[in-house]
Image: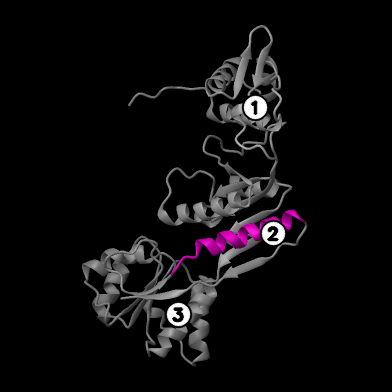
Amino acid sequence: MKITKHAPVAEYRQIRKYVVDTVWESGNAPKRLASMRELAAMFNVSIATVQRALKELVDDGYLTVRAGVGLFTNPEQRWTYEKTDVIGILVADGRQIYYEKYMWELLAAIGSEVTGARRLLYPVNFLQTGTCVPETPTGIAMKGLIWLRPDFSPSSTADAFAASLKVPVVVVNSRRPGYSCICDDWEREGYDIGKMLLAEKRTAPVVVTPNDQAPQLTGLRRAFDAAGLALDERLFVRHGPDMCDRFRELLGRSGTPQAVYAIGSMVRDIQTVIVERNLDLEACRLIGEPVIREPYFRGWRIKHDFKALARTAWEQLAAEINGAPKRERNIVREIETIQ
């Protein structure tokens, strides 16, 4: 495959953002842009990089050329005619290339909520650089940031970027000290699942868990403790490279379990064994939160409420922008039966 070299993408992106921001902030009057030499010094790039960026901006209609005078912003390219706040959106580590259904639906819900409040959404990403792309000197500053699932792909770069901001940051579906966190109520989920299992006299569930600190597991234990019962940890399958082998071995040793509670999206991690063993889902209560309804799935499905997460996150960020304190808020999810 032939690789074509271009000017550094991060530098080009900064110049483009600077010009687009200038077009918006200039209002109805065309504004003369700084010279190419001044822009090269401003962004610490070569004049060739500036030339390429400006040529594309002229081609796209953001700039007009006045012979012998210079480049001017084109008011007709303003995408909105009212001044409004810009809200940043950071997905996990800021280096996402592909999106699966869960993250895309969460991102879409946040986008709809923020833009529905007549704010502009600015995607923050670190794809081209190891460090954050700083706001340009005359760029439009963010009023706040919504950070989705930082625990999905932990990153010191994203952590440092969020910590450097002087504006409110709201984290969605991860816990981060020092920030407002809007999360699904995972402990409540585990507790409710435990009560439902006990009501059906299913006292020996197989638990597929990412780790022993999962809040769902805390809630499940609390429900069993309240009933004077203990979970059988011999029936725990912990996340790891050999988890399918361990799950397969457990089924071979114990037969069809009373229930399988796959915490989070871990139904997907064990689904090959479920299908391979043709697990009897009439006798076994399968519990999980698959984003896509796999054809085999019958049992209790924990529904995602992306709209509630997005609405609550935006309400909290808007409140903090206006001086409200940080706070944690939990979203209780519905558990539905799939026949």
Question: What numbered label is drawn on residue 193?
Answer: 3
- The residue under the point 62% across, 21% down is 45
Residue 172 within the segment the image draws in magenta = no
Residue 300: percent from the left, percent from the top?
Answer: 38, 75
Other-residue count near label 3 (Cα within 10 Å), few / some / many at <14 / 14–19 / ≥20: many
Residue 2: percent from the left, percent from the top?
Answer: 35, 23
- Going from the N terminus, do you reach mark 1 or mark 2 first? 1
Q: Is residue 228 left or right of residue 143?
A: left
Question: As drawn, which residue projects farthest toward the bottom?
Answer: 228
Residue 11: percent from the left, percent from the top?
Answer: 59, 27
* Residue placed under numbered mark 1 in the picture: 75
Q: Is residue 131 visible?
A: yes
Disc 1 + disc 2, Cβ < 8 Å: no
Give the secondary structure at mark 2: loop
* Residue placed under numbered mark 2 in the picture: 178
- Going from the N terminus, do you reach mark 1 or mark 3 first? 1
- Please provide the residue range marked out in magenta: 303-322
Question: As drawn, which residue projects farthest toward the right?
Answer: 323
Residue 307 within the segment the image draws in magenta = yes
Q: Quadrant of residue 288?
A: bottom left
* Distance Cα–Cα, label 2 vs label 3: 30 Å
User: Looking at numbered disc 1 in the image, what kind of residue is underneath it?
Assistant: Pro
Question: As drawn, which residue projects farthest toward the top?
Answer: 68
